[in-house]
Image: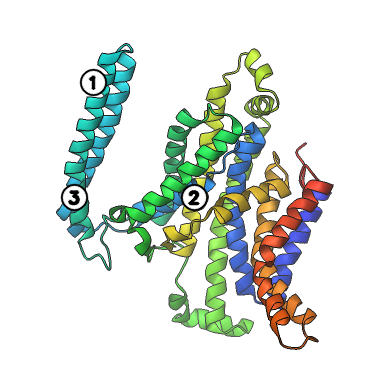
Amino acid sequence: MRAPLLFAAVACLFVLTGEMQSWNVALAILNMALVSAIMAMGVNIQWGYAGLFNIGGMGFVALGGLAAVLVSMPPVPEAWAAGGVGVVAGLALGALTVIGAITLVRRMPAGRMRTVLLLAVLIAGFILYRRVFDPAVSAVEAVTPAATGYLGGLGLPILLAWPAGGLIAAGAAWLIGKTALGLRSDYLAIATLGISEIVIAILKNEDWLARGVKNVIGLPRPTGVPFEVELQRSAAFLDWAAAWGFDPMTASSIVVKLAYAGFFVVVLGLIVWLAERALRSPWGRMMRAIRDNEVAAEAMGKDVTARHLQVFVLGSAVIGIAGAMMTTLDGQLTPGTYQPLRFTFLVWVMVIVGGSGNNWGAVLGGFLIWWLWVMVEPIGLWLMEVVTSGMADGLLKNRLIEAAAHMRLFVMGLVLLFVLRFAPRGLIPER
């Protein structure tokens, strides 16, 4: 009964938030908790199934957000006319240069001639790439930079961006895994963190791709999620809100958040169902065997490197889906907000606290830790005001009240320490 009781306790936290603060706040926390639970599922697939120490989750979340822009935003015809062909040609030249260099290394025997030819291909390809790419990028970014300045997307429904985010993240994970999965666990962690920072740097600086730090706003909503203004103009909705005693603005916001929650619950349920089936299959038993003893698994004929690459791609795809969902919920892509503390280390806390290797534990950790992350600061501020209510105004009282802003970091560390001390396998341990 441990798992049902823990989920019931976390549900009570959300209900209390709705009753004591507002249901708008409770539902906003719930939606981000659902997205965070999916991120935790992706990390759990990598770490809990196969023992891969990936701390580059932030980069895959950002790639999912980029997918939302590339799929759902309308194309900018002026930008395509100004330099779209040049951008595509430049990227193609860059890819051909890399492919040519790899082919040269594989086909020619090692020696001075191969080195000279490799340098010639790389230098010539780089010069040609910059000659074609740079003027095209400048032309694209000069097209009404205050409003666009980028190529735009495909103008497709936003729901298609969610699987697209998973595919883009999976493709990036395959490229990363082919080069980094041979590293020892601590070096793999450093490599994935560095690569995620490179992804964020590209998103911030390549304005032609997604407007960089100028942000892309106004992403469309999924079909079935109305805008609040549309609801407030509906006579039937106004009558319904009046019957339930809600003012139209509050009621419209609640309905929109419930619509998002419905989509997110379906996605989370599907991922949990698939992950549970995979975990209990022969493939899942093989992955746990590799995690527990790579040498023994390899001695039994298992291709450890290939299985590591496989699970690394699968986990990254799940994280990419969550990144696309989060950008859809926000309605905008803001590369400056992707921080390792939120999108890497906090997700790891969710997995560790919930229970590494247990899918339901990862989901529980996502809900509990995100609720704490949001609510600890206002609760801490209230607590500090109560503690200092009898103190005279002065430096000490002001410092104590200001310290409430740092309560979330203190509490996260405290929760992690308590769980590692009293439940080292998590709140819902792996069976």
| CA distance for labels 2 and 3 | 28 Å
Res. 300 visible in picture: no
**In the rendered image, which residue does mark 2 sit on?**
61
Which residue appears farthest toward the top when viewing the image? 109
- Choose between 356 and 235: the one closer to the eye: 356
Q: Is residue 39 left or right of residue 291?
A: left
- First in sequence, mark 2 or 1: give its number: 2
* Dot 1: element: helix
* Label 3: how many Cα within 10 Å (few below 14, some 14–19, many 20+): many
Kind of residue sitting beneath label 1: Leu
Query: Which x, y percent locates residue 17?
Result: 70, 71
User: Answer yes or no: do the residues labelled 2 and 1 have beta carbons within 8 Å?
Assistant: no
Residue 206 visible at all:
yes
Please, what secondary structure does the residue beneath circle 2 have?
A: helix
For numbered disc 3, what is the local secondary structure? Answer: helix
Q: Is residue 365 above or below residue 285?
A: below
- The residue labelled by disc 1 is 117
Find residue 24 and name its label: none
Instruction: Find the distance from the CA under tag 1 to the CA under tag 3.
Output: 29 Å
Disc 2 crowd rating (10 Å Cα; few below 14, some 14-19, many 20+) is many
Mark 1–mark 3 CB contact (< 8 Å):
no
The residue under label 3 is: 136
Mark 1 vs mark 3: in front:
1
> Which of the 4 image quadrants contains residue 243?
bottom right
Q: Going 77% across and 46% down the picture, which residue do you hit? A: 428
Tell me which label, 2 or 3, sits earlier in the chain: 2
Q: Residue at x 72, y 72 (%)?
A: 380
